[in-house]
Amino acid sequence: MSIRLIVAVTDGDWFDQLRQQPNLQEVNFWSPSDSPFRALQPGELFLFKLHAPDNFIVGGGVFAHASSMPCSLAWEAFGASNGAHSLAEMRMRIAKYRRTKPDARDDFVIGCRILTQPFFFDRSRWIPVPENFSPNIVKFKGYSTSDGDGLRLWEAVQDSLSGSNAELEFSERPQARYGNPVLVRPRLGQGAFRFLVTDNYRRRCAISGERTLPALDAAHIRPFSEGGAHEISNGILMRRDIHSLFDLGYVTISPSMKFEVSKRIREEYENGRHYYALHGAYVQVPEDAARQPDRSALAWHNENRFKG
C-alpha cells in the first residue's frame, strides 16, 4: 500500500518550545485560519520544516485528526502542547498571523491538526527537503510513497528515527526497514480524545442535545485511571454538568443506550428535576457501529460507578 506524507512549514517559536518539552504524547499543529484539512488519513506522517534558509525537515508526528475549534478550547485540550506558554501568548500569535490586534475577548476559531507520538530530530539528523519543495510554499506539500520522492522521504525519516529515542507503533509489523510502508497506529492522548469524541457526536450532547461547545465535555465511560482507553468507543459527548454526575455515579447509560438517573440525587440534594425529566431517554449515538460506545464499558460503569 502507499502512504501519504506532508511536509508543512512550521512556526519557529512553536517548534522551539515543543522540542524542549519532555515526554510529549501529542501536539496541536494549529493554523490561524479554520480552513479544512483533508491531506492525510489517521496513521500517516505529518512532517514539519523550518522557514528558509533552514530548509530541513526537523521533526513530525503521526496524524490523528483535524478539526476547527475556538482557541480557548484548543488551549484547554492541549495546553503547552499548542507550542505556547499561555493562552494569551497563543492568542497573540494567532492575531499576528491574522494581521489584527489581539484582544483578550477574541476566541479565534483555528484549524487544529492533531499529531500523536511527536518526534524532534537532533540537528545532525535533520533531513533536507526534497528538491521539488518550492521555496514559495507557505503551508505544506504532499507526497506519496508510491513515487520516488515520497518513498525516499519515508526512508529518510525511518533512518533519522532509528538513531533517536522516538519509536513509532505501526498498524502492522513492517517486513524490514525498507519494506512496504505501512500506517502508524495513532496513540491518542487526552486532547486528541476530546476532539475526536466532540466531532464524533457532531458537537452535540448525546443526552440533552445541547450544542453550546464550551459547555460540552468528552466523557470517558471507563476512566483512564482505571483501565479505560483514550478511544472513541470509550467516550461520549456530554454537557458538563451531566459529565460531572456521570463521573460521580449519579447518572449512567445502560448497555441498551438509555439514560438513567439515580434516586440519590433527590435524596441527597433535594433537587434534580431537570435530570429526572431525561430519565429513560435514548442516548443519541453515531450511526456507524464502530464509533458507538462500547457496551462492555457501559456495563462496567453500571456495575462499578452507578449509585442506583
Image (tube, rainbow, N blue to C red):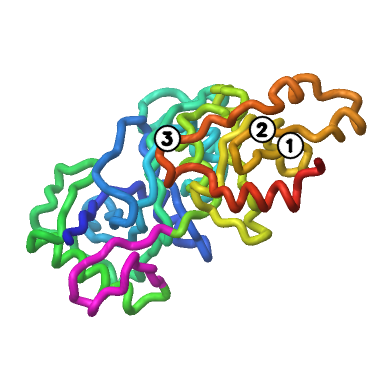
Q: Is residue 133 left or right of residue 63?
A: left
For image coordinates 62% across by 24% down, the residue present is 208
* Circles 3 and 1: CB atoms closer than 8 Å: no
Magenta segment range? 166-186
- Location of mark 2 (residue): 259
Q: Nearer the viewer, residue 219 or 113?
A: 219
- Mark 2 or 1, nearer chain start: 1
Q: Position of residue 107 (x, y in %)?
A: 51, 26
* Amino acid type for the residue under numbered disc 2: Phe
* Amino acid type for the residue under numbered disc 3: Glu
The label nearer to you, 2 versus 1, is: 2
Distance in Å between CA atoms under marks 3 and 1: 23 Å
Q: Where, by quadrant of the figure, is residue 165 drawn? A: bottom left
For image coordinates 46% across by 27% down, the residue present is 108
- Location of mark 3 (residue): 287
User: Total label count?
Assistant: 3
Crowdedness near tag 3: few (<14), some (14–19) or many (≥20) residues, C-alpha within 10 Å: few
Under circle 3, the secondary element is loop
- Mark 2 or 3, nearer chain start: 2
* Amino acid type for the residue under numbered disc 1: Val
The secondary structure that most of the magenta stretch takes on is loop
Q: Nearer the viewer, residue 204 or 122?
A: 204
Q: Position of residue 179 (x, y in %)?
A: 19, 75
- Mark 3 or 1, nearer chain start: 1
Q: Where, by quadrant of the figure, is residue 120 drawn? A: bottom left
Under circle 1, the secondary element is strand
For image coordinates 50% across by 60% down, the residue present is 24
- Location of mark 1 (residue): 251
* Circles 2 and 1: CB atoms closer than 8 Å: yes
Q: Nearer the viewer, residue 202 or 249?
A: 249
Q: Is residue 280 left or right of residue 93?
A: right
Crowdedness near tag 2: few (<14), some (14–19) or many (≥20) residues, C-alpha within 10 Å: many
